[in-house]
Amino acid sequence: TVVKLAIATCTAPVNIAVVKYWGKRNEDLILPINSSLSVTLDQDQLKTTTTVASCRSFQEDRIWLNGKEEDINHPRLQSCLREIRRLARKRRSDGDSSVDVGCLSHKVHICSVNNFPTAAGLASSAAGFACLVYTLARVYGVEGELSGIARQGSGSACRSMYGGFVQWIMGEAEDGRDSVAQQVEPESHWPDLRVLVLVASAERKPVGSTSGMQTSVETSSLLKHRAESVVPGRMKQMIEAVRKRDFAAFADLTMRDSNQFHATCLDTYPPIFYLNTVSRQVIALVHQYNRHYGEARVAYTFDAGPNAVIYTLQQHVAEFLSVVRHFFPPDNNGKKFVTGLQVEHLGIS
Ligand code: PMV
C-alpha cells in the first residue's frame, strides 16, 4: 500500500525589537498594548528549523523541540494548529485548489530545532512560532497573510514572518484582525547595518515574558504611560530614522526604548530584573564609546534577558569588537570571555 506523506522543512530567523512590545490587552488573542518595530536577522544566523509531516497513519498530533517531545496541548500551539487548519478549510471552500484536502484530516508530526540557546532572552519563541506557522501553511498549501496566526503563538513571532525592518501594528479590532506585522523596509535597504550579540548568559530567564508582561500590565503605571504617551511618537520617529538610514537617530531611539522597557520591569511589583552586572557594564561601555566620538556609533538593546544585542555600522565593527575584547578578555579556550561574554557576529536578512 502507498501511504501518502506531505512534508515541508522551513527556517525562520530571530527578530530583535528596537521598539519593544511589552503588555497584552487581550491574553487569549495576544493583542498588544502598543505597536513595536524590529529587525529580522540573517536566515543563516540565529534561526529555527522546523519540519512538519502529515500522514494518514499518524494517530495524533505530536511535537519535538530540540530533540525532546513536548506537550502538543500547549494552548498557544493549539491556537496555531487550529487557525492554520481553519484557514485551509476556508480557502478550500472558497475554491482554492492549492490547498491539500487529503492533509486536512490527517495528524501532523512537528520537529523543531534552534541553533541558539532557548529562552535566554534571544527571541527563540519568535523564530519558533513563525517557523511553525509558515511550515504548517506549506504542508496544507495555504499562502498569504499569516502573521496574525503567528502572533497567536507568540506576539513577537508575527514580526519574524517578514525580513528586514518590520512593524507590528497593534490594531484596534476586538477580534485582532488588524493586529498584524508589516514590512517597513526590506533587508536590502540598509546594507551596512550590523548586529552583534554579546552573550552574557545562556541560562533560561527567571521570569518568562508571558507572566512578566501580565504582572507589568497589572502593576506598572510607567508601562501605561509608555504605551499611551511614548510609543506612538517613537514608532513614527523610528520608521523615519530607518527610512532615512539615520544611524544616530536609530541608535538613540533604540537605546532609550530598551532602557524604558527595563525601567517598566523595575516599576513592576514585585520588580523583574533581566539585566545583570555584565549587561550594565556593556551599557556603560557603549555610552563611553559614543561619547568619545561625540556621536552614536553603536547602540545596545536588551530583551527579557541579560544578553546585549548591538546595532552598529560595518565600518565600526572591528574597532568596537576590539574594545569589547579589551574590557571582556577571552579566557583560555579563546571563545568565551572571562565575564561569560561571547560575541556572535551576525547579519540581517
Ligand atoms: O513574544 P514574546 O512573548 O516572547 O515577548 C517578547 C518581548 C520582548 O522580546 C521583550 C520584546 C519584543 O518586542 O520582542
Image (cartoon, helix red, strand yellow):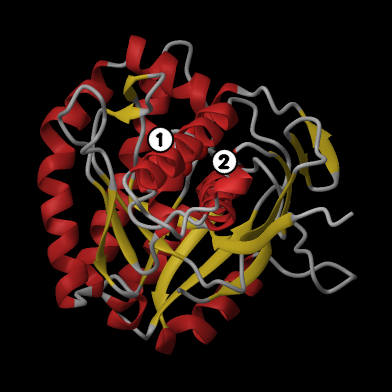
Quadrant placement of the N terminus: bottom right
The residue carrying mark 1 is 262
Residue 36 in percent (x, y) is at 28, 45
Looking at the picture, does residue 312 appear above or below residue 2?
Answer: below
Circle 2: residue type: Gly
Quarter of image, res 4: bottom right
Looking at the image, residue 22 lies above or below residue 181: above
Q: Residue furthest front?
A: 1
For residue 305, the mark is 2
Residue sitting at 58 percent across and 41 percent down? 104
Mark 1, Cα crowd under 10 Å, few <14 / some 14-19 / many 20+, is some
**In this view of the protein, which residue sits in the foreground, 252 or 81?**
81
- Residue drawn at x 55%, y 44% as measured from the top left: 129
Q: Amino acid at mark 1?
A: His
Instruction: Work out whether residue 13 or residue 227 is closer to the camera in this orientation and state it.
Output: 13
Query: In the displayed structure, does residue 114 sit left or right of residue 81?
Result: right
The percent position of residue 246, horizontal first and vertical second, equals 19, 74
